[in-house]
Amino acid sequence: MFGSLLDFLQSFLIFLVKYYSFFLTFTLLLSFSCEAKAQAVVVDQLVATVNGEVITRSDLVWALVLNSKIKEKSDLTANLPIILEQVIDQRLLLAEASRLPNLDPAQAEISKALGEVIKKFPSEALFYQRLEEVGLTGEMLQKIFRERLLILKYVDFRFRAFAIITENEIQVYYDERVKPKLATQNITPTDKPSDEERKLIEAILVEERVNNQIEQFLESTRQQADIVRLVSL
């Protein structure tokens, strides 16, 4: 029973993290044409401004270049509107994060995060080839990762540190959301979750609370911000 339950909880936690990963920075979309030249020319276009700060088409492409799953040119075109909204949200979070002292990530943290992304590609050479194809320099790559880690640190400081989950909330989640799932699999659950199951449920509830707080924050911040979309993507 525990194996099935743990699998369920772990898969749901992974889903939560992936679903909201655009806030934390590692679920961005990438696109390359099969016939793309080794050194494609990136043509800049102003697409939006956030409180006077410009977002260009290159910014969107550079935000997309870190996902290994999307490879076709059609994917880029289809997802540009989604990515624009995500980049706008990231700019809003970054503006708040930049106001706080002592959040700057160390170079070791940046290198580690970059290494984790590179591992998702077939090879390091292919990863850097794709960067070259969209005109993303090493300096800009470091800047992108620094900003994403800064946002993550801000989220931890502003939201995650205050996401305290009670034992009652864990039990309610277990009773109302885990037990019915187990029933559909003809598994008889125990009255209370095991220690390992409890930790997974707590992690899920923390992610849910943090994600809800981020969305509430962004909804309020968007209303107060001066956001201008200059083109239809």
Image: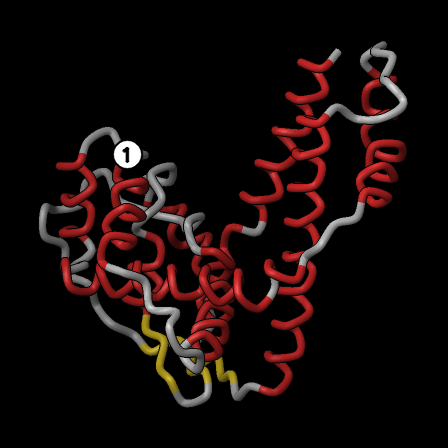
Amino acid type, mark 1 = Lys
Say which quadrant the C terminus sits in: bottom left
Frontmost residue, 228 versus 103: 103
In the drawing, does residue 48 fall left or right of residue 144? right
Frontmost residue, 119 versus 79: 119
Q: Which residue: 49% across, 72% down?
A: 93
In the drawing, does residue 193 fall left or right of residue 29? right
Q: Position of residue 157 (x, y in %)?
A: 53, 66
Frontmost residue, 44 versus 217: 217
Q: Is residue 171 above or below residue 96?
A: above
Residue occupied by mark 1: 119
Q: Is residue 164 above or below residue 75?
A: below
Crowding at mark 1 (Cα within 10 Å: few <14, some 14-19, many 20+): few
Identify the secondary structure beneath mark 1.
loop
Q: Which of the 4 image quadrants contains residue 52?
A: bottom left
Frontmost residue, 226 versus 204: 204
The mark tally for this picture is 1
Q: Which residue: 49% across, 84% down?
A: 228
